[in-house]
Amino acid sequence: MNRTAELGQYPTPVWVAEALVERYFAGLGAGDAVLEPSCGAGSFLGVIPPEVPALGVEIDPVLAEQARRNTGRRVITGDFTRAEIDFRPTAVIGNPPFRTQLIDAFLERSHALLPEGGRVGFILPVYTFQTASRVARYASRWGMEQTLIPRNIYRGLQCPLCFAIFSKDRRRTLVGFALYRETVASHGLEARYREAMEGTGRGSLWARVIDVALDELNGEGALADIYRVVEGRRPTDNPFWREQIRKVARTHFPRVGRGRYARRSQETLPLVA
Ligand SMILES: C[S@@+](CC[C@H](N)C(=O)[O-])C[C@H]1O[C@@H](n2cnc3c(N)ncnc32)[C@H](O)[C@@H]1O
């Protein structure tokens, strides 16, 4: 592999960098600080408003020097995943090389450097988000939002692209992603519960899961018992399916004590949850 391909050296057109910063980081001010973790010759670094402190990092010394000259900003020559960085950014903006492990390492380092409320904005290949488990892993630490952008902003690029914002805040909101948490939740269930969810039948999916659990519990049980049998030997910290079970049990199953529910009679099965 040549050096360009190995280091993912595909510069972003300046107009693209400018449009993305204007659209997604319009509120940047003198109280912010922007870090460009793989700044190349400085496409993003050069469009950060002059009053906003900014720092570049670039592994290739030739490009790092070009970025210094092109932008007048300080640029650390080094590997962003391990370089010593004496700068506390409120935003990390750029275009890391399109290698999944490296993207993960860039996100990891960004998370460590950013304060609560800080944001990352990266151009990424859409395949970064193609599996539910990967997205769920990101979503356990970040709120996330993504928007498609044209792949042919880079000449000859074959993969679809998006601009993704990762927000380090407690809300963990997902915008532009659907069914990821649900998919991970259903894959984590014991086989018979997964079958109950995936098979066709009457009633909501989660109601069928609860039916199977209450059968296993001899007709009735507390929510904690239902969670325990559903999750089986693979306890998970995914709150999503517990929330679903709690909601559906409350609305569709007879309550027989504090937080305890019983099997439904066949006639009362709801068609939807
Ligand atoms: C896709 S280019 C993007 C350059 C610039 N952000 C832009 O948009 O024009 C990726 C850049 O990352 C640099 N790079 C690769 N691995 C790196 C690492 N571990 N740390 C810092 N820079 C790295 C490459 O040399 C290349 O300049």
Image (cartoon, grey):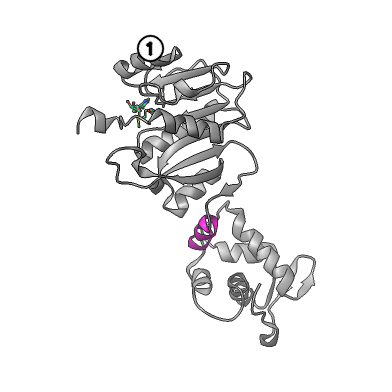
Instruction: Look at the image and say whether residue 166 sits in the magenta stretch.
Output: no
Stretch in magenta: 179-187
174 in relation to 268, above or below: above
Q: Is mark 1 within 8 Å of ligand 1?
A: no
Q: Quadrant where the C terminus lies?
A: bottom right
Q: Position of residue 34 (x, y in %)?
A: 53, 23
Residue at the left extreme, as displayed: 1
Q: Is residue 170 above or below residue 180?
A: above
Specify the amino acid type for callout 1: Arg
**Residue at x-position 76% and y-position 65%:** 259
For mark 1, give the secondary structure. Answer: helix
Asked whether 159 or 224 is in front, the reply is 159
Quarter location, residue 46? top left
Horizontal side of 178 relative to 80 (left or right) equals right
Q: Is residue 191 above or below residue 115?
A: below
Q: Is residue 59 left or right of residue 117?
A: left
Question: Which residue is rendered at x = 38% and y = 48% of the image?
Answer: 127
The residue indicated by pointer 1 is 69
Q: Does 57 sit above or below residue 23? A: above
